[in-house]
Image (spheres, rainbow, N blue to C red):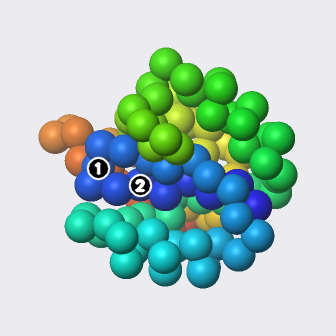
Amino acid sequence: MIYFIAQNNSMVKIGYSQNINKRIKSLKTASPFPLLLLGYMEGNKKFEKEIQDKFRKYHMMLEWFKVCDEILDFVNKNTLTSTYCDFDDKGILRVYKTMKK
């Protein structure tokens, strides 16, 4: 599975794991900030790389990218979760449990 995990309203990790819950636990242990699962989708390491290449202009370090509307739109349209992500008027990342009308 390919996952999208946000950290501190500024970065999103685009990664691959066979066990997302286990991966989130290990990331939470290493993160000084709260983590938020934005979504996940079927895929393999090759597809993970294609997605990372698609968002290369937002790359920050390793598998971390700047959270932006383009990435959130991709997550909203392509992941298997019933969430919707956007920014409020102050630029704070929001995640709704169901699609926003």
Position in image of residue 7 (x %, y %): 34, 56
Residue name at image x 46 percent, y 29 percent: 59
> Residue 23, relative to residue 67: is it above or below?
below
Mark 1 — residue?
9
Q: Residue type at mark 1? A: Asn
Position in image of residue 89 (x %, y %): 20, 38
Residue name at image x 24 percent, y 67 percent: 32
Q: Residue type at mark 2? A: Ala
Tell me the distance, in whole angstroms, between the alpha carbons under discs 2 and 1: 7 Å
Is residue 101 at all visible to an observer of this figure?
Answer: no
* Quadrant (top left, top right, bottom left, bottom right) of the N terminus: bottom right
Q: Residues within 10 Å of mark 2 (few under 14, many from 20)?
A: many
Do tag 2 and tag 1 residues touch (Cβ < 8 Å)? yes
Quadrant of residue 55 in the image?
top right
Mark 1 lies on a secondary structure that is: loop
Closer to the camera in the image, 6 or 98 = 6
Mark 2 — residue?
6
Closer to the camera in the image, 31 or 21 = 31
